[in-house]
Image (cartoon, helix red, strand yellow):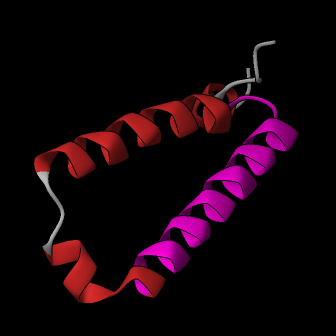
Amino acid sequence: MGNPWLEALGDPVTVLFTLLRVGVVYLTLLLFLRLSGKKVLGQMTPLDLLTLLLLSNVVQNAMIGPDPP
């Protein structure tokens, strides 16, 4: 029997691609937030925040699992 922590993570290649996807999305969002500036972020409405939360949920599905057709 192997290490249960390593078995819980799954295939190392899958973990690597997931980390790569997460990093790319994180850096892209960070870039967009930096470019928008503090004034724009302070003027966000609840609808804007809700849109960001919904977008993050959609992106999460693409990062974690395979893309369904």
The residue positioned 76% from the left and 23% from the top of the image is: 67
Q: Position of residue 13 (x, y in %)?
A: 87, 42
Q: Quadrant of residue 55?
A: top left
- On screen, residue 7 versus residue 27, left or right, reads right
- In the rendered image, the residue lying farthest to the right is 13
Tell me where residue 48 appears, x and y as whole percent: 25, 50
For the C terminus, give its image quadrant.
top right
Q: Please state which of residues 17 and 3 is positioned toward the viewer in this rendering.
A: 17
Residue sitting at 23 percent across and 50 percent down?
49
At 72% from the left edge and 28% from the top edge, which residue is drawn?
10
Q: Residue at x 50, y 74 (%)?
A: 32
The residue nearer to you, when weighing 24 against 44, is 44
Q: Is residue 19 located in the magenta-colored stretch of the structure? A: yes
**How many callouts does the rendering have?**
0
In the picture, measured across the screen, residue 13 lies left or right of residue 59, that is right
- In x, y percent, where is residue 40? 26, 78
Q: Main secondary structure of the magenta part?
A: helix
Question: In the rendered view, would you say 35 is above or below 19?
Answer: below
Residue 6 image point, x, y percent: 67, 36
Q: Quadrant of the N terminus?
A: top right
Taking the magenta stretch, the answer to whether it contains residue 36 is no
Location of residue 39 by image quarter: bottom left
Q: Which residues are magenta?
A: 10-34
Would you place residue 16 above or below residue 55 in this image? Answer: below
